[in-house]
Image: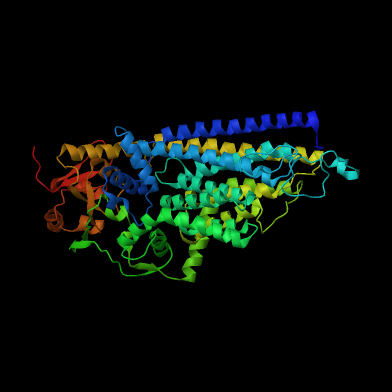
Amino acid sequence: MPRLTGSGENECRSGYQCTEGTVRLAFWALGLGCAAFLAYTTRHHINGDAIAYFDMAEAFRVGAWPGLINLTYSPGYAILLGSLEKLLPWIDELYLAKGLNFLAFIATMAACDRLVSSIIPQSIETEGISPSPVPGVRVGAGLKPASTDSRPLAGEERTGKDKERPEWGAAFFPILSAVCYSAFLVASLVWVRLQVVAPDMLVFLMLLLGVSALLRIKSRPDDFGGFAWLGVIAGLGYVTKTFLLPFSVVFFLLALACSRSLKRAGALVLVGAAIMAAIAAPLIWAQSFKAGRFSYGEAGNYNYAYFVAGRGERVHIPRRIHDDPPVMIYDATAINTYPPGTDPAYWHLGIRPTIDFKSQLSRFLSNVKDMLGGTALPVAAVLLWFCSQLFKAPISPIRIRPPSVSVMLGVISLLGIGMYCLIIMELRYVAPFIFLGFVALVCLLDYNGVTFRARDRAILASWLLVAFLVGTVVYSCVDQSFRALASSPPKQSHRQTFMEAQAVKDWLVDHGVSRGEAVAVFYPPHDTLRWARLAGVRVIAEVRDTRAFAEEPAENRINTLDALRSEGIGAVVTKRPFAEKLSDEGWNRVDGTKDYYVKLLKNRAP
């Protein structure tokens, strides 16, 4: 497309804005529609981490501050959830969590929209459009482009082959935006998922805001506000998830690389780091006090020691109150539905990570395999699309200092994925980094100067990719909703699991088990202990060997239960099949459930 001036340029620009506006409208309509649908259909789903966040949210709501300090889970998500519980106390906490996830998704969508509208103009130079000093705001014709090259400027005559190779930058804005938007919907709705009660969507938001801060610094390297905003985001990110504190080093180093003067940038980076430290300091102090040494959180140490290699002795050990079979009891004063589940890192203090190259390599390869297995089709589609584009559009110049947008996003993406692949892999953890990697690939392509024929093929391939990614989102929405609402034996639907938890809670209440009372389970605890959270009981004891308990003589089982009774345990709840054969020993099947059984250990008033 030749460079236009005067009325012709305004006409072109008006048409372009309309086309991009249509893409953005479709993005918001599809995103909000799918998210609202999922938030409603998956409202009964509860994951294992949810109980910990519910306990922390209750501690915040009632002012029991020690219960908010957790060495495994950061309190940011729980504080927001507890605030919603204060505002809407009549709504079930699980439903409030899904509402919070929906609100977080809207905020993340807005951050994605702002980021894409900022990145595309900065990564593709087009006629009369140059990057704005402020991310998200385009500067019209007549301003000097961010970089110059040998292409003719407005009004200059194109000669020879240049006449046959027009600049198509503006023509590709809408479709490249659509590629980024659809990749975001896959990452957020398919991989992160609204149904999970966890801060992963907020982490996605913090990463996108951090990248926006870097783009602001890149456009205005001497601007104090960009570094200050990056410090605020890094501090809030740490309060949201511990991982973002060490990872903020990556953002500050990129901010340093974006500056013209290392001396000036170094001072500004220190200011940003100081702001981050001021936000993080109260939480670091509280966690250090709980850990008995300096600590910004023990999730990393715990996960590495548990999943890769660890050594040492536990500092906090549950009491053994019976030997055959082993029966353990946890001493807990804070709000804890299940102490080792609410804060597993606390109960593993003393076990430190150790270097074991063989275990590390094995874990890394296993995590990479799991990641590729869960993302295979979308990743393959994007890579196939990218390779097809390389035949039509060359790679844009790659700069290290200041880093080009593709380098900046690529570094964040690869380091984030790599850090999680070293220890623990769940798609919801790496989804934001995979998305940023997708955007980095888009920013690598330079469509200025492609031929008419190549333009049409490139746009067609891009729309096919968008159609595939959107289809993936729609299919996942239907699949998630089906799993949530319809049982497919032997698996129960999320709704059926929720109803069983309600039935166990009602049974306990009807039989006199009061809120705050201690109960026991068989290890490992079944499902998510949602019934315990609903009933308000504390699961502080567990029988470690289910088979030994079921096969030993009745007299030995009585001794085991007596040991629990002597510690004030009011009931034992299990989902083990052995209890069906022990009805003559006082094990009661809970009506409305498939295989829940309860043994009361205290005499209850009729």
Q: Position of residue 323 (x, y in %)?
A: 19, 64
Residue depicted at 48% across the width and 50% down the height: 232
Q: Position of residue 339 (x, y in %)?
A: 27, 54
Give the image's coloring scheme: rainbow
Residue 25 falls in image quadrant: top right
- Number of marks in the image? 0
Observer able to see residue 5? yes
Observer able to see residue 493? no
Report whether 324 appears left or right of 314.
left
* Residue sticking out furthest to the right: 160
Q: Position of residue 254 (x, y in %)?
A: 59, 57
Q: Position of residue 151 (x, y in %)?
A: 82, 46
Report whether 503 appears left or right of 150.
left
Residue 7 falls in image quadrant: top right
**Quarter of the figure with the N terminus:** top right
| Depth check, front residue: 253 or 428 | 253
**Quarter of the figure with the C terminus:** top left
Residue depicted at 26% across the width and 40% down the height: 534
Q: Is residue 366 above or below residue 583?
A: below
| Depth check, front residue: 414 or 604 | 414
Residue 24 falls in image quadrant: top right
Residue depicted at 25% across the width and 44% down the height: 532
| Depth check, front residue: 42 or 302 | 302
| Depth check, front residue: 328 or 83 | 83
